[in-house]
Amino acid sequence: MSRRPPAWASPSLPCSRRSVTTTACTAWTSRVARRGSRASSGASPHGPNPNGSAADESAGGSTDGSTAGSTAAVDRAAARAGIAVGLATAAYGISFGALAVAAGLDIWQTCVLSLLMFTGGSQFALVGALAAGGLAAGPSGIISAALLGARNSLYAVQVKPIIGGGFWRKVLAAHVTIDETTAVATAQPTLRAKRIGFWVTAAAVYIGWNLLTLVGAIIGDALGDVRQYGLDAAAAAAFLGLLWPRLRARQPIVVAVGAVVVAASLTPWLPPGLPVLCAAGVALIVGLANWPGPGASRDPVASEPREAEA
């Protein structure tokens, strides 16, 4: 006695109808094939797969694959940003090496200063004071360098959750928590990308800055006035490239404009370093007051769905 074939095996294919589109035909054929595969393995054509997964999990594999690919793309973008900022900043190390030697430091003293201090603003402040007043200006140069370096302690609050645990990791991170590493890390969308951005930038800046400091110290006389090459503009352009995509909401714009106005207004009147700290106070005041209102700090890009943080 012949049995009636199941619905999924019906020879009456809708694909034989001319009114059916190619896309619908392909989708129907795919469903028939999956049901037939389940039926041959003893599972219900409309029920779950024998391994307990839902019928639609065949599409889930591609979703997982695309998610992994997207995460890898985000990580690569963070690494590229770190390398780009590192190269732009390191190029300015030539200027520091040349200026330090011109201010009276030996080559080895110049290199040790870059290795141990490793914060460009403070290094230039110290060297500038020595160039203007010699050793007698050393104390004022040290004070200026300390004031400029104090901003890095504010960055530490931002990067601490990014760094993770481990005593020696935190010690190393403290030495390389500077403008560049903080800017690249905080601009990334996921925790994993933030860490990659931080450490790649740290390595690129530290290695490049110290190597080119040595180069500048050795060939400083041949370079002449290094400011004519515009290396300082390259570093500023790199920072602007990181900052610009974040100026999409009212609150970041208010902070940026307010900080520029405060720093520019106070620079002629205060010692180096203090205008920067006062400008940072703008962000603190705006954040505590939550001005200019709810939703003003919401970045349209940041509010889009992102990968789960690693």
Image: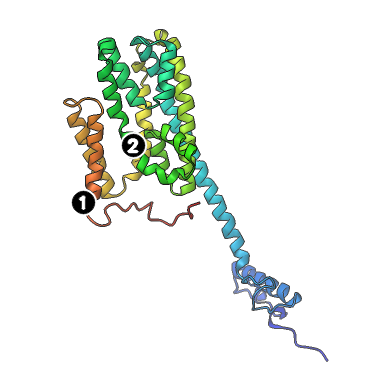
Residue at 30%, 32% (x, y): give it.
Answer: 150
Above or below, comparing residue 165 to residue 177 in the picture? below
Q: Is residue 23 left or right of residue 308?
A: right
Residue, far bottom: 1
Q: CA distance from mark 1 to mark 2?
A: 22 Å
Which residue does the numbered mark 1 point to in the structure image?
A: 289
Above or below, comparing residue 48 to residue 99 in the picture? below
**Label 1 vs 2, first from the N-terminus:** 2
Q: What colouring style does the render use?
A: rainbow
Q: Amino acid at mark 2?
A: Ser
Q: Is residue 81 visible?
A: no
Q: Which mark is residue 148?
A: none
Residue at 31%, 53% (x, y): give it.
Answer: 298
Q: Which mark is residue 153?
A: 2
Q: Is residue 282 left or right of residue 9?
A: left
Residue, far right: 1
Viewer-side residue, 11 vs 261: 261
Number of residues whose C-alpha sits closer than 10 Å to that of mark 1, classed few (under 14), some (14–19) or many (20 or more) = few
* Element type where label 1 sits in the image: helix
Q: How many marks?
A: 2
Number of residues whose C-alpha sits closer than 10 Å to that of mark 2, classed few (under 14), some (14–19) or many (20 or more) = few
Q: Amino acid at mark 1?
A: Ala
Viewer-side residue, 145 vs 229: 145
When asked about the image quadrant of residue 177, the answer is top left
Residue 41 location in percent, x, y? Answer: 75, 74
Residue at 49%, 31% (x, y): give it.
Answer: 203
Q: Is residue 176 left or right of residue 35?
A: left
